[in-house]
Amino acid sequence: MSDIRQIAQRLVELCREGKYEQAHEELYAADAVSIEGNGLQPDGVTRGLDAIREKGRQWADNIVEVHGGSVGEPIVAPGWFSVVMGIDATYKDMGRVAMQEICVYGVRDGKIVHEQFFYEMGKS
């Protein structure tokens, strides 16, 4: 589990520094899957590292201004870890939104292979 703990700590460190692309490069497997909420929305499931990178770029390009944010300490279990993250930002398409989410990550062979985000928009 120490391997997972190291990956979790590194992800938290990079997210706190706003280095999301570096986190993808260092920590994610090429076949990683990203799921927004329950994954039932038409664009709720993103497959592959290149697509996850592009999703991240689109999210970042939509931000006008970040007013605040937080990244909690990871909770680690065999094969998985979770982190509570929050952001208060103004977006081009939604205006100002404050949200917190629970981020769950699956790890296999020293790489993140699964991420899933659970949140309610506009809730803090």
Image (cartoon, grey):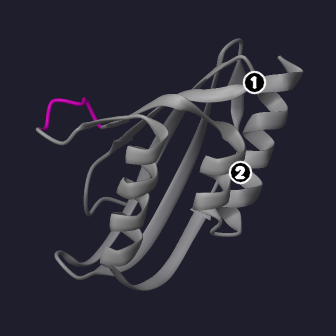
Residue 15: mark: none
* Dominant secondary-structure state across the stretch colored magenta: loop
Q: Residue at x 72, y 17 (%)?
A: 109
Residue 110 - label: 1
Number of residues whose C-alpha sits closer than 10 Å to that of mark 1, classed few (under 14), some (14–19) or many (20 or more): some
Residue 57 screen position, x and y as percent:
41, 65
In this view of the protein, which residue sits in the foreground, 49 or 45? 49
Sequence order check, earlier mark of 1 and 2:
2
Please give the name of the residue rendered at 49% of the width and 60% of the height, measured from the top-left corner.
86
Q: Is residue 113 visible?
A: yes
In the shown orientation, is residue 16 left or right of residue 119? right
Horizontal side, residue 66 vs residue 28: left or right: left
Residue 12: image tag: 2
Can I make out residue 72 in this image? no
Quadrant of the rendering where the C terminus is positioned: bottom left
**The disc labelled 1 sits on which kind of residue?**
Gly
Q: Is residue 90 left or right of residue 111?
A: left
Give x and y (percent) for residue 115.
48, 33
Query: Which residue appears at 30% of the width and 59% of the height?
Result: 123
Callout 1 secondary element: loop
- Percent of width and height locating residue 122: 26, 63
Placement of the N terminus among the 4 image quadrants: top right
Compared to 31, does 67 lie above or below?
below
Q: Which residues are magenta?
A: 37-41
Residue 92 sits in quarter: bottom left
Circle 2: residue type: Val
Q: Position of residue 91 (x, y in %)?
A: 28, 79
Secondary structure beneath label 2: helix
